[in-house]
Image: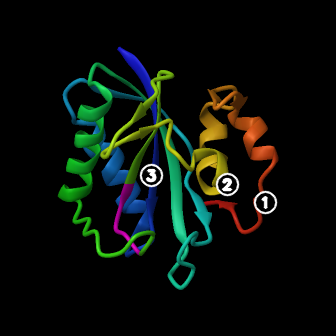
Amino acid sequence: MTRAYLGLGSNIGDKAAHLAAAVEGLAGVPGLRVVARSADYRTPPWGETDQDWFLNGALAIETDLDPHALLDACLGVERDLGRIRERRWGPRVIDIDVLHYAGAAVSDERLVLPHRYVRERAFVLVPLAEIAPDLVIGGETVSEALAKLDRSGIQRN
């Protein structure tokens, strides 16, 4: 089994219920086991800021799925929960991002690992630091990357 980390987010409807349903859906994927879950964090929108606040969290998983199969599993859970992709960085019922996969470096049209923006987004790093502060991404730990970012507006739910 390989350790990987996922980021979760929602800003439509019952955000906490959507995150919980995503965790449940992921836990039901064959070859995937959730081993840690952060608290949920209320965060301001990023990218397109003319939308409701988000609820974000992070998961540590163990999986025997390869990175692309893991991505497909995440997209399947999103689809099952009603995710519709209308605009980049727009509102969403659920978003599940593969953030890191056992140090794998992947860069193709479907997947970039580690996630290309993971070290630039406090809304990702705050929950990730709760469950994996010493995880090294891009030559620095999650805690070190987070220390460089503005965390204003992020509140534990």
Which residue appears at 78% of the width and 60% of the height? 150
**Is the Cβ of the residue at disc 1 closer than 8 Å to that at disc 2?**
yes
Q: Position of residue 151 (x, y in %)?
A: 75, 59
Which image quadrant: the N terminus?
top left
Residue designated by label 1: 150
Q: Nearer the viewer, residue 28 or 7?
A: 7
Mark 3 is surrounded, within 10 Å at the Cα level, by few (under 14), some (14 to 19) or many (20 or more) other residues, namely many
Q: Is residue 92 magenta?
A: yes
Q: Which of the two discs, 1 and 3, sits closer to the camera?
A: 1
Query: Given the image, on which type of amino acid does mark 3 rest?
Result: Leu
Mark 1 is surrounded, within 10 Å at the Cα level, by few (under 14), some (14 to 19) or many (20 or more) other residues, namely few
Mark nearer the N terminus (1 vs 2): 2
Q: Which of the two discs, 2 and 3, sits closer to the camera?
A: 2
Q: Relative to 154, is 127 above or below?
A: above
Mark nearer the N terminus (2 vs 3): 3
**What secondary structure is found at the residue carrying circle 1?**
loop
Q: Is 64 displayed left or right of 157 in the figure?
A: left
Query: Over which residues does the magenta segment extend?
Result: 91-95
Residue designated by label 3: 8
Query: Given the image, on which type of amino acid does mark 2 rest?
Result: Ala
Q: Nearer the viewer, residue 74 or 29?
A: 74
Query: Given the image, on which type of amino acid does mark 1 rest?
Result: Asp
Mark 2 is surrounded, within 10 Å at the Cα level, by few (under 14), some (14 to 19) or many (20 or more) other residues, namely many
Q: Is 108 displayed left or right of 118 in the figure?
A: left
